[in-house]
Image (cartoon, helix red, strand yellow):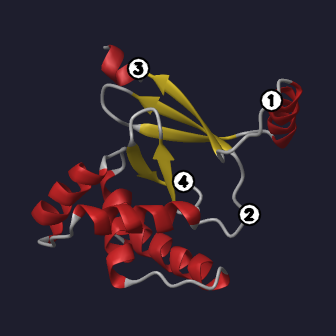
Amino acid sequence: MENIQAHIKQAEKKCRQQGAQLTTKRKLILTALLQIDKAVSAYELIDLLEKEFKQSLAPMSIYRILSFLEKSQLVHKLNIANKYVACADIINDLPHVTSQLLFCQQCQRVDEIKLNPTKLLELDNKAKQFGYQLLSSHIELNCICNTCLR
C-alpha cells in the first residue's frame, strides 16, 4: 500500500501542476486501478469499488473521472477492449512519453513499454504521408501473455 500512496502523492502533484485537483473520488478510482493491476471496464470498476471500498458511484461519474484521469495522463484507455489501466509512469517526475501497451486479451494484464522517440517520429511521419494525424498517446497491441499460453 505504501507504493500506491507514493503513486497517489505523485498524481496529486501532477494534477496541481496542471491546475487541477485530485479529488477524493478521483483518488479512489486511481487507487482502485493501481490495486487491481489489470485493465478493467467502467462497470467492472463500479463492482470493484462496491466490493473492496464499500463505495457506490454512478456510471456517469465513473466515466467523467476516468476521462479526467486520462487527460491528466494518469490512466490509459485501451480502445481495443474499452478498458482502463493506471499509467506505469505516474511515479516518475518526467514528462509523459508515448508508449506501447501490451494487452493480454485473456487475463487483461497490461504492460507498458516506452516507445523510442525516433520510432514515434517515424510513425508520425508515415501517418502524415498517408494523410493521417496521430491522435493517441499510446499504441495498443492485442496479445496473449505467456502465463495464459500455458
Tag 1: amino acid:
Ala
Ranked by sequence position, the earlier of labels 4 and 2 is: 4
How many numbered callouts? 4
Ranked by sequence position, the earlier of labels 1 and 4 is: 4
Measured as percent of width and height from the top left, residue 81 is found at 39, 35
Q: Residues within 10 Å of mark 4 (few under 14, many from 20)?
A: some
Measured as percent of width and height from the top left, residue 112 is found at 56, 42
Q: Tell me the distance, in whole angstroms, between the alpha carbons under discs 3 and 4.
A: 20 Å
Q: Secondary structure at mark 2?
A: loop
Mark in the foreground, 2 or 1? 1
Residue at image point 82% right, 36% down? 124
Tag 3: amino acid:
Asn
> Is residue 40 depicted above or below 60 in this figure?
above
Q: Tell me the distance, in whole angstroms, between the alpha carbons under discs 2 and 3.
A: 31 Å
Q: Residue furthest top?
A: 150
Residue at image point 66% right, 82% down? 17
Q: Which residue is mark 2?
A: 95
Tag 4: amino acid:
Ala
Ranked by sequence position, the earlier of labels 3 and 4 is: 4
Q: Which residue is mark 4?
A: 88
> Is residue 58 depicted above or below 20 in this figure?
above
Tag 2: amino acid:
Pro
**Lateral position of residue 108 relative to residue 114, left or right:** left
Q: Tell me the distance, in whole angstroms, between the alpha carbons under discs 1 and 4.
A: 26 Å
Q: Which residue is mark 1?
A: 127
Q: Which residue is mark 3?
A: 146
Picture quadrant of residue 146: top left
Closer to us: 7 or 97: 97
> Is residue 70 depicted above or below 101 in this figure?
below
